[in-house]
Structure formats: structure tokens, C-alpha cells
Image (tube, rainbow, N blue to C red):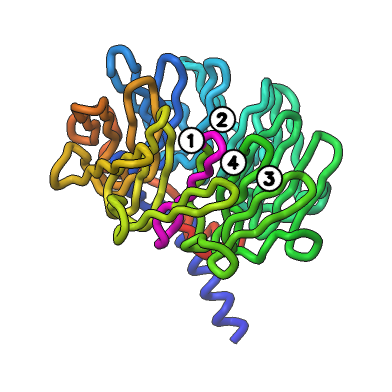
Amino acid sequence: MKKVLTILLIGISGLCAQQWTQYTNGDDIQVLASDDQNLYIGTTGGLAIMNKETEEMTLYNNLNSGLPDNRIHSLAVDSGLLWVGTRFGGLTSFDGTDWTTYNESNSGLPHNYVWSLAVDGNMIWIGTYGGGLASFDGTEWYTYNTSNSGLPNNWVYSLALDGDMLWVGTSGSLTSFDGTDWTTYNTSNSGLPESYGIYSLTMGSDLLWIGTYNGGLISFDGIDWTVYNTSNSDLPNNDIWSLTVDGNLLWVGTYGGGLTSFDGTSWTTYNTSNSGLPGNAVYSLVMDSNLLWVGTYGGGLASFDGTDWETYITFDSGLPDNDVRSLAVDGDLLWAGTITGGLTSFDGTSWTTYNTSNSGLPGMQFIPLLWTAICYGLEHQMVSPHMTV
């Protein structure tokens, strides 16, 4: 038996040394970010930067630039500097000319899978998938993990800043860090419920709102916790995908339960049965003045002004794909990133779609790489209830 195991490991090791082909697709928009000049589009096929004035789009991938990995998971903009978190290539900064890549080999970055980013003045906070949390001020790195700090878990899914306080959402725990002291909240010492992870954080006027995967919605005012789930409230589903705040109103996008608003007292739920919401799995939310934009998984896009719904699907509008993963508002323009249809903008009348056929968005590419899924899984034992590599 021991000989067989040895042979199998050698065989897998041999496979891991070979070059395989990775298929990437620029029509799969993962994340959007913007500044005054550019729209930044992170895809599974690389990074695209669109000049807002000229609409000229420039593609960067790991063949024509310093981008270390085409699978982009997170973006953050800091005073003209773009930070790019990749799936397995680490963290990269881009100033419009030069790329600087930080990874496990050449820096204090604790893990090459960068899940979340947050900018705090001259500091970039980096949440990784398995390596804990890091901060970088342009010179010094500081790494925080379960061994050297109060961080309770090395899988950092979400980050939020509230003044000098950093909030860190991990797998099953919430932690605050003020630069000196860590305070961790979990099921044993707080009102935080059991969940598979904290995937969304947003600040209200005086509350931190916490969206979990399978644990419902929680509010925290620094002292008291309030848990809302399908058993004790009118929350329609315990899987929270998206959160946004509009004044005193919280909007909650769920997976399967539709969209809910909460004013601190009353819940109002909108779904495909009782409203114009086109899909009950709500991927993304963004406010545009008094208009809420809702991106769904499979149902297209909708807008809601508190009274009337407008629905946009591929059949009757210029929306290129009904799976709308990311949304951003820039002036009078809505940007929507889809899973297979690329990027589209909408000014209230006209649609303009950018995809792999008509723009600089990266097309299907054939890029040599190591057999990451197996090699990486053997070395690090990656586990997630809904993770797609």
C-alpha cells in the first residue's frame, strides 16, 4: 500500500511539473472600479482600462504586461494608483506606466490569492484566501495571521473601514483592529450566528451591517448585536449576497429570497411573485440618487424608485447577459458587468456593450500554466462551501 501511494504521489508530482493550458474569458466580468478618468474592469481574462472620455479600451494580461495572473478577484484605486488582487499571482500595482508585483516570494504578502482589498490613506489592506491579512504602506509590510495576531481565521473574505477601525470578515468570525488591539466576535462570545463566512460588510450611519452565507443578517453598534434570519424576522433568505445603504434604509440582496429593504423596524420584500424584480438571486446592488439598481443571477437587471420597477433582460433591451455580477454608477451612466456578455453601459436610453468581439476586452486565451488546481489543492488543502477556482 505504501508503494502504491508513493507511485501515485510521484505521478501527480510529474503532472504538476507539466505545462497545461488555461482557458480565460474576458466576457466574464468579476469586479469594477473607477476614478475620475478611467473605468477599471477585472475579468477572468485580464484587466481592461477604459478612458471615460474617449471610450478607448486598453487590455492588459500576463502576456503583454506585468499583470501576473489573468484571473482578477479584487480592485482598489488609490490616488492614481490601481491595486489589482489576482487569483494566484499575488498583488500588483499599476500607475499607468509601470507594474509592480508583490507575491509570496518577493515581499511580505502572505498568500498569492488576494480575495479583498481596502485603501486607508497611504495604506493598502490585503485580505487573502488562506494566508491571513496584510498591510502595506509602500515600504513596510505587516502580516497578521492566526499565529502572530488576534486574527481568528486566515481566510479573509471582506474588509470595511470605519474611521481608524478596520473590520475583517472571515470564515465564521468578525474582527475589528484599531492598529493595536484586536477584538474578535464569534458564536461563542457574541451574538454572531453560525455561518459559512462573512461575505459582505457595509457601514450605516451608526451601525455595521454584516451579511453572511447561511447565517442571515446582523447589525452591530459596538455594544449590541441584533441577528435577523428567516426564523425571527421577515428576512426571506439567510444567504446574503449584497448590501447597500440609502439613508436610513438598508437594501439586502439574497440568494433565492429576492430583495428586501429594512428601515430598522419594518421589512419589505420584493420577489418575482409580488414585484417587478426579475430574479430572486440578487448578485449586486448600487444606488444612483433615488434609484436602486439591482443585478440578478439569471434574471437580468432592474431599477426601482420606490414605486415603479423597470426591468431589462436580453430579450427586450441591450443588456448582453442576464447574469449581472457587478454594478457601478458614474455620473448619469450605469455600468454593468456580466458573466458571459461582457461589459455594458446604460444612460437611461441607449446601451453600449463591450465584449471580446468589438472591444479591447480579452477574448478566449490559451495560456500555459502549471496544473494549479491539483498541485495547489494538495499543498494547501483549500476548502470552501461555494468556491470556484
- Tell me the tag on residue 68: 1
The answer to whether residue 378 is seen in the rendering is no
Give the amino acid type for the residue marked by disc 3 in the picture.
Answer: Val
Q: CA distance from mark 4 to mark 3?
A: 11 Å
The answer to whether residue 96 is seen in the rendering is yes
Q: CA distance from mark 1 to mark 3?
A: 26 Å
Mark 2 and mark 3 in contact (Cβ < 8 Å)?
A: no
How far from the left and from the top, in percent, is residue 266?
Answer: 53, 52
Q: Is residue 77 above or below residue 255?
A: above
Please state which of residues 22 and 130 is positioned toward the viewer in this rendering.
130
Q: Which residue is mark 3?
A: 168
Mark 1 and mark 2 in contact (Cβ < 8 Å)?
A: yes
Taking the spot 51% from the left edge, 40% from the top edge, the residue there is: 244
Q: Which residues are magenta?
A: 246-259
Q: Earlier in the sequence, mark 2 or mark 1?
A: 1
Give the amino acid type for the residue marked by disc 1 in the picture.
Answer: Pro
Pointer 4 local density, CA inside 10 Å: few below 14, some 14–19, many at least 20:
many
Give the amino acid type for the residue marked by disc 4 in the picture.
Answer: Thr
Q: Earlier in the sequence, mark 4 or mark 3?
A: 3
Disc 4 or disc 3, which is closer to the eye?
Answer: 4
Q: CA distance from mark 2 to mark 1?
A: 7 Å
Q: CA distance from mark 3 to mark 2?
A: 24 Å
Taking the spot 52% from the left edge, 16% from the top edge, the residue there is: 80
Q: Name, please, the residue furthest toward the right.
A: 180
Magenta stretch: residue 251 in it? yes
- Tell me the tag on residue 101: 2
Q: Earlier in the sequence, mark 4 or mark 2?
A: 2
- Tell me the tag on residue 202: 4
Q: CA distance from mark 4 to mark 2?
A: 29 Å
How far from the left and from the top, in percent, is residue 332?
Answer: 33, 22
